[in-house]
Image: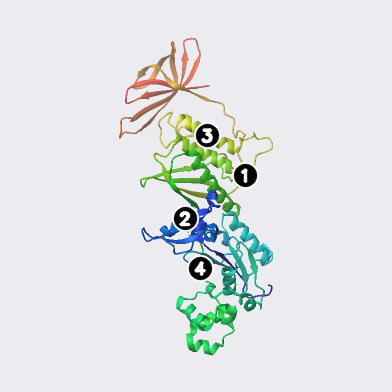
Amino acid sequence: MTNQTSLYACLYLREFPAQALLRHRSDLHGSACVVMSGEAPGEEACSLNTKARLSGMKHGMSRVEIETFAKPIIMRRSIAIETVTKAALLEVAGNFSPRVEDLSEDTAFVGGIDILGTRSLFGPPEELAKSLLMQIRALGLSANIAVSRNFHAALSFAKGFSRRASVQMVNPGEEAAALSSLPLTVLAVSAAQLETFASWGIYRLGQLAALPEKQLISRMGQEGKRLQQMASGTLPHLFQAIEPPFRLEDRLELDAPLHILESLLFGIRMMLNQLITRVSARVLALASVTVTLELEGKGIHERTVRPALPTNDKELWIKLIHLDLEGHPPPAAFVAIALRAEPGSTSKVQLGLFSPQLPEAGRLDITLARLSALVGEGNVGAPALPDQHLPGSFRVERFALPSGHTSMGISAISRVSLRQLRPPEPVMVMLKDARPEGLRFRTRRYVVEHLYGPWFASGEWWNRDRYGLEQWDLTARGEDGSILCCCLMRDRVRNRWQMAALYD
């Protein structure tokens, strides 16, 4: 398959509604599962798993007919889960080629990938198809993949091949022979057209391809010619590529309301494994995970977990989510679980040869989560100065590990250091012309020699916590000759003097 002008890989997932619902339900893989669509009492079976088909169940059966079989598992069709699963499949396909086409049917996922020119990246087409199939299996799904230089030949062969979860190659020039034994149902044939072909004794693609072209067109028009070209693997295709968005989302719907945290974590663990597999394929990591629980009674409980650094450590994520949900449990039983994640770069912190060792990011996140559970959310983090002049004011921000190069040296020699008093100590001040002239501090008297100021600060005038401050920096001499360098602060709202800090 070299020196070609086109090369396609088509993937086909039959019984897509059932596969989408069961990919996180490993406990039901050994049971006969049926997916019902429509409203009661007119519900019909729209998708079956292998065990259900082998038991004799068929599409279109009513709920009453399904319940006559031994212990069937009946599930409601979920368009939301199918949408999330389809997005994951298109994302996997996009990992191998930027040109992806979605041709999905009502109960089957059909996708086409233009893989021309990918040999240098992924090897021969057969190796690419096997790698694609492995990634689809990692999502918990089963698919058929066919590769051909004709799009419709690959699509028909993927639909008609009986053995599931396989890769088939159609060699150039052998499209008609490969398709000859497939039934007509692999084509987009209407019921009336099937009836017409059956009256002619035509049941296979090889028989359709062998019909005289002019006589076929005279009886069925150009549609007959199109079907014959598809049967022979010669119909050209206008590839309509799409660009699916990269969204790390997953969803699991429960059969009955649940309120047990351990069971919730079991489902989250399976979905996290899928998200980590998808994000690892792009050499990225999970930066944050949002857990949304749909509660019984139409409510929603949502929590977001964001570690210090993006990571793909599943056990770390499970522990962080467990601690967060323990501290903020859902107020009622939940009926569905949805995960939404944000990707981040897998950057590493480069330390210097003599720099102190930083704590391990995973252990640090768990420690911070446990501290938050003890002292309350918002009380653990790194202090930061707010945009105001109130002395002693600060806020707590989310703690983050430093990145890049951090200077550990001292840029300049500091000759004076400030020792702030917490809390400020009371002081008696003697004034002259509204300026400090002497003071009494800690049973000693001082005479002011040098005075600098005043500096005024005020704010929060719109509420009860308003403040107005008057600051003086001064040098004073005591009765025994000792020198005092300090910072005096007068509360202008309460007219109270305090010793705010001492200069060493």
Q: Position of residue 150 (x, y in %)?
A: 60, 75
Disc 4/disc 1 C-alpha distance (Å): 41 Å
- Measured as percent of width and height from the top left, residue 414 is found at 57, 29
Figure check: 380 above or below 19: above
- Tell me which numbered mark, 2 or 4, is placed earlier along the sequence: 2
Which residue is label 2 attached to? 81
Mark 1 — residue? Answer: 348
Q: Quadrant of the N terminus?
A: bottom right
**Disc 2 to disc 4: CB gap under 8 Å:** no
Q: Amino acid at mark 2?
A: Ile
Residue 141 as seen in the image, left or right of residue 353:
left
Q: To which residue does mark 3 refer? A: 368
* Numbered disc in front, either 3 or 4: 4
| Callout 1 secondary element | loop
Q: Which mark is first along the chain, 4 or 3?
A: 4
* Image quadrant assignment for residue 44: bottom left
Secondary element type, mark 4: loop
Pointer 4 with pointer 1, Cβ within 8 A: no
Q: Earlier in the sequence, mark 1 or mark 3?
A: 1
Residue type pointed to by label 1: Lys
> What amino acid does circle 4 point to?
Leu
- Image: 99 above or below 472: below
Question: Disc 4 marks which residue?
Answer: 103
Residue 388 position (above or below residue 447): below
Q: CA distance from mark 2 to mark 4?
A: 18 Å
Q: Residue at x 46, y 58 (%)?
A: 35
